[in-house]
Image (spheres, rainbow, N blue to C red):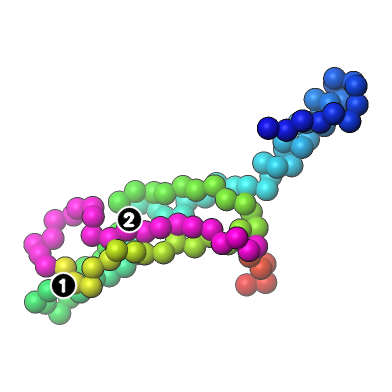
Amino acid sequence: MISVVSTSDEGARDADSLALLRYGLRRYHRFAAVRKGQGFASVKLAHRDERAQLVAAQTVVRTARRDERIYTRTIDVPSELDGPLPPAPGSGRSRCAGASAPSRASR
C-alpha cells in the first residue's frame, strides 16, 4: 500500500501515487525459472551403463527484483534409478530461490 500526502490537490496526489507505484513495479520482473521439458539432471540406471535424463514436468514462473540473482538448485535426486522407467514425476525436485545480494552486471 502506498500513500502520497505531499499536497492537498487530489489530482496531484493521484499522479504522485501512480508514479510511486510504477517506480516500484519497474523494479520487478516475471521470468520462467524452469521450462517444461528442460533437463536438469542425469541419473545412473541400475544394472546398466546408461543414464536417464530428468526433465522438468512443468514450467515454473517466478517474480523477482531486477537486481536479484536467481538460481535454480536440483534437490532430492537419487544417485541411481532402477527400472522399468515410465515417464513419471517424482524422481527429483528443483528449487528456485533468490540471493539477497544484488547481482553484478559485469558477469
Q: Earlier in the sequence, mark 2 or mark 1?
A: 1
Image mark count: 2
Dot 2: what SS?
Answer: loop
Residue under label 1: 45
Query: Residue 90 at x, y = what percent?
Result: 23, 55
Which quadrant of the structure image shows residue 87?
bottom left
In the rendered view, does 104 fall on the left or right side of 88?
right
Which quadrant of the structure image shows residue 20?
top right
Residue at figure coordinates x 78%, y 35% from the top left: 19
Q: Is residue 51 visible?
A: no
Residue stretch rendered in magenta on the structure: 82-102
Alpha carbon distance from label 2 to label 1:
19 Å
In the rendered view, does 38 fall on the left or right side of 44?
right
Identify which residue, 77 or 39, lies in the foreground: 77
Residue under label 2: 56
Identify which residue, 17 or 39, lies in the foreground: 17
- Quadrant of the image for the C terminus? bottom right
